[in-house]
Amino acid sequence: MSKLAFLFLSAALAMSQAGRAMAADEPVPPHESFTVESAALKETRRINVYTPPGYGTAEATRYPVLYMPDGGLQEDLPHVATSVDTAIRAGEMRPLILVGIENTERRRDMTGPTEVEEDRKIAPRVGGSAAFRRFISDELIPEVRRRYRVTDETAIIGESLAGLFIVETFFLQPELFDTWIALSPSLWWNNEELVRKAGERLKARPHLHQTLYLASADDDIIPPIASLAEVLRTSAPAGLRWQYKPRPDLHHATIYRGASPQVLRELFPPEAKER
């Protein structure tokens, strides 16, 4: 990681922490919480769940599920749940269940291995994304399916290091979700490994039919994100629906709140009514 990237990360993490501190005072739509004793992570994880209006009475209806890292009540869940609830009630988005994964060691869970010494300075422990991915795939998703009326449709949304985790997981385990939303993903990690290996990984999976949405802010380290978009232009399988949207009107610290309401409406439009 370059000195510029490290300085950017330090500033971005500081702004991110400030934003999450603000979230402590934010209202959140009705929700419930449960815990999972994770063998993959060797710890207890708290999960916060928003269900759409009418869920309690529509006993025959099943819903898609949107998963989100940084999903604590003092993290990003309040503003994402509010955006989802507002859009559903306005008829601008189809109903879904939102599952927020509350953090314990965020920088451990969201990052893969790295050979770059500067990368390792961001936290006492990094490189735990494989275990976090096992937690989601082998423990959390089955538990959500057991507790809630869900369809097989799944999605995931996240920003910054969570965006990095989302892109990494897309390349390594693309069948895990149908829709992938990575806002300002930290693709500089490990000397841009995900970008460097993107072409060969895409060619190795010619039958991808997922949806991938990428966005960058005006103060991001944009070249890695733009480079990934270029690889997608030349190497994406025909069935992969992908979009890259630069957002020069937003900053790294504001892109989640600024972009997610419209992105979610776009990717989960209301179902057409039968005539």
Image (cartoon, grey):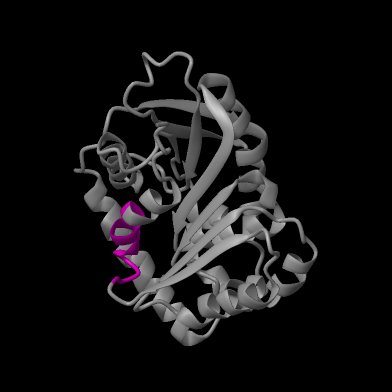
Query: Does the magenta-highlighted stretch encompass residue 251?
Result: yes
Image side of residue 254 versus residue 49, left or right: left
Residue under the point 45% across and 54% down: 158
Viewer-nearest residue: 156 or 5: 156
Q: Return the x and y of residue 203 as percentages of the image width and height.
A: 77, 68
All told, the count of numbered labels is: 0
Can residue 190 be seen in the rendering of this structure? yes
Left or right: where 82 falls relative to 231: left
As for residue 236 lying within the magenta part, the answer is no
Q: Quadrant of the C terminus?
A: top left
For the point 39% across and 56% down, the residue is 263
Q: Position of residue 111 (x, y in %)?
A: 58, 60
Q: Nearer the viewer, residue 164 or 233?
A: 233
Left or right placement of residue 249 versus residue 208 in this view: left
Query: Could you tell me which quadrant the N terminus lies in?
Result: bottom right
* Residue closest to the eye, 30 or 35: 30
Residue occupying the point 61% across, 75% down? 233
Vertical comparison of 118 with 14: above or below: below
Task: Check the image and name the residue furthest to the bottom.
Answer: 3
x, y percent for residue 33: 40, 27
What segment carries the magenta color?
Answer: 250-261
Q: Is residue 114 shown above or below 90?
A: below
The vertical placement of 22 against 183, above or below, is: above
Residue 127 in view of the camera: no
Which residue is at the far front? Answer: 275
Q: Quadrant of residue 94?
A: top left
- Residue depicted at x 56% and y 40%: 154
